[in-house]
Amino acid sequence: MTKTRMPWPWVATVLLMMTAFAMPAVAGVPSGIIPHHCQQILHSDLFLPCYLNDSSNAAIAQSIEWTFPSLSDPNFSTLSWPQWPASAQAQLVQVFQDTVAWYNGGMISYPGTLPPDPPPSADVADYVGGTIPFPTLDYKVAFQIYLQHVAMSLAAEVYQWVPWGLHGYDANTLFTLLSPIREFSDCNAEYSNAFCPSDEATPGNAINTFKFLKTNGLIAPTTIDTIGNVLDWARSHLWHFNGLWTPQNYYYNWQYWGYPPVSRVIAGTPNTDPQYGGYYSTPEHWTAGCYGTSSFLVWVLKVVNIPAETVAVGGHTSVHFMSESMYLSHGDDPYNALSKAGYPAKLLLITLDEYESWFLLGDFATANKNVGRRPVDLAVQYPSSNAVRFLYCADVQANLDHASGAVYNQIFSPYYPVWYLEEVFLWQRIQEAVNTLGCPTVSQ
């Protein structure tokens, strides 16, 4: 009698997770919680100060902060909302009212003055010339961008433009969502009274980003499904850019001297690099790899009050979706060729336990091995992508066995033994996908 070999315990666990992938259930707190004494002045310019100054919203107010110049201090002072100068508080009130008017008017005409999108670099000549290693934004422009994002967050909360509420987040999460510190670094002392984007994306107008999410039906009843919808859009639209992370190559891809503008990634741009001879003249949704994509996702989700932050995965970058305590195994996962297999993109998310075990602190080799692992795991269950079928058809044509073929050696070998993949009928299921979809001519 032949003894049936049981799967290794860790492999069995992976298969179980792929077969019945359960997202965490987050009860949350709904949006629209307004102090009673503020409700009667909801449509007045007195409302926002009433709301932010109420003790029930102290954590929200403390998370709204900015670095202001001080006449008595040669350095800049970081102040939270209660300590803001009256003129700055008045600016936020006005932007909040303009944002509400814009939304109530069908998201067509914004009554106030919008900062340029994308914003001009404050030190473009120095950046292009290599004097400074990163692009900068004028202090006043950065403040206007920040005011817009805060106003959008508050309006979405107060008027229930999204179902989930700010009161469901702890102080650290609110700080990540509402404070500018993780999006702008203070480089005033060095670079011409300017702020520097901390991550590799240039923010645009919050109203444009919100309209993009709203009109494309990406805002779902839950945060996890909204994240999934945005990842689905990324999977269908984003393309990893060509070349290096240099000012000149940024300009070729996005016609902008600075990190990729969120608005231009959404709209699509041509690649004007002369070495391609116009081959990429048709606009594409270029993204600056895992660094740019992770930062892009942070800024896009911010306008609908979904907190996210960039994190390290080996020598690469990914995203931590804080409301779900979930991650991507690589910022490139959404448009990984293996991910284009028809399953809901939210299945790309991994748990905190997986993140911590795959990307161990101090174990760089293990971390780098696991960069982009989740699409490989999912390909065991969903082996219908062009990438898998392309290699499979080449293996069949070359008459290669499973252990020698490209399907195993180019995709699965870092994580699975051949015998296990045979026991879960991987190659039979790939053949079924080929019977239905055929052999693709390209692997993307």
Image (cartoon, grey):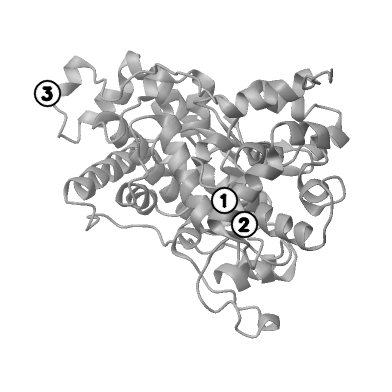
Q: CA distance from mark 1 to mark 2?
A: 8 Å
Of the 4 image quadrants, the one containing the N terminus is top right
Query: Which type of secondary structure does the marked residue at label 3 adopt?
Result: loop
* Residue of label 2: 386
Query: Which type of secondary structure does the marked residue at label 1 adopt?
Result: loop
Discs 1, 2 touching: Cβ within 8 Å: yes
Marks 2 and 3: which is nearer the front?
A: 2
Q: Which mark is residue 55?
A: none
Q: Amino acid at mark 2?
A: Asn
* Residue of label 3: 40
Query: Which type of secondary structure does the marked residue at label 2 adopt?
Result: helix
Of the 4 image quadrants, the one containing the C terminus is bottom right
The reply to whether residue 36 is visible in this rendering is: yes
* Residue of label 1: 340
State left or right for residue 215 relative to residue 169. left
Q: CA distance from mark 3 to mark 1?
A: 51 Å
Give 181 or 283, whichever is nearer the viewer: 283
Marks 1 and 2: which is nearer the front?
A: 2
> Counting other residues with Cα less than 10 Å from the Cα at mark 2, is it few (<14), some (14-19), or many (20 or more)?
many
